[in-house]
Image: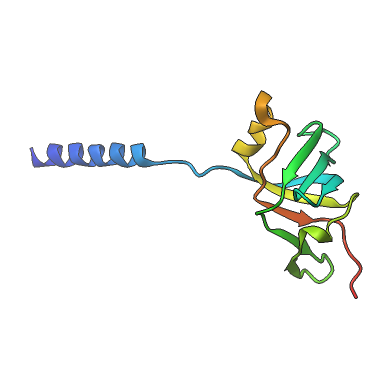
Amino acid sequence: MKKILSIVLVLVMVLAFAGCNHQEESLHLGYNFRILDINSENMTLTVEDMNSRQRIEGKILIPCSDIPIIYCDYKTQDVTAIDFSDLTVGDEIIITAYKKDINALAEENSNNILKVSQIQLGTQRESN
């Protein structure tokens, strides 16, 4: 009887832990965009997907007022924080965004605004 009770108790615990399991939200890295326009007043970028298969279609607006923007020097591997003012039209950027935010672009009321977690300047700058 104790053995059966122990087995039932273990099964109940396993089911309880399985019910508590929640999945972390997927973070997507490496969406490549080209900057088409910069609105310094509103701190927004208008960008287009550089991927030939266009995972994200059309022009996208990215609000940048509260997200980190970084630059990685590919030669030295140094990563530094940069300002919004360091970006220029034509620059290539790499964004990090959550899957839910990317999927939200498909919604009718999205206005093609993409919330991102981070922007990395992909265009390499000459070192001084």
Measured from the top left, where is residue 101 in percent x and y? 63, 38
Q: Give the number of callouts.
A: 0
- Position of residue 16 relative to residue 127, above or below, is above
Residue 26 horizontal side relative to residue 51, left or right:
left
- Residue lying farthest top? 108
Give the residue displayed 74% in from the left and 68% down from the top.
Answer: 80
- Position of residue 95 relative to residue 55, above or below, is below
Name which quarter of the figure residue 58 lies in.
top right
Give the residue displayed 66% in from the left and 45% down from the top.
Answer: 97
Q: Could you say which is closer to the camera, residue 23 or residue 83? A: 83
Q: Is residue 107 visible?
A: no
Q: Tell me how the rendering is colored.
A: rainbow
Q: Which quadrant: the N terminus?
A: top left
Name which quarter of the figure residue 68 lies in.
bottom right
Give the residue displayed 88% in from the left and 54% down from the top.
Answer: 88
- Residue lying farthest front? 41
Give the residue displayed 77% in from the left and 50% down from the top.
Answer: 94
Measured from the top left, where is residue 128 in percent x and y? 90, 75
Measured from the top left, where is residue 85 in percent x and y? 81, 59
Q: Is residue 68 visible?
A: yes
- Residue lying farthest left? 1
Residue 52 horizontal side relative to residue 111, left or right:
right
Residue 6 horizontal side relative to residue 118, left or right:
left
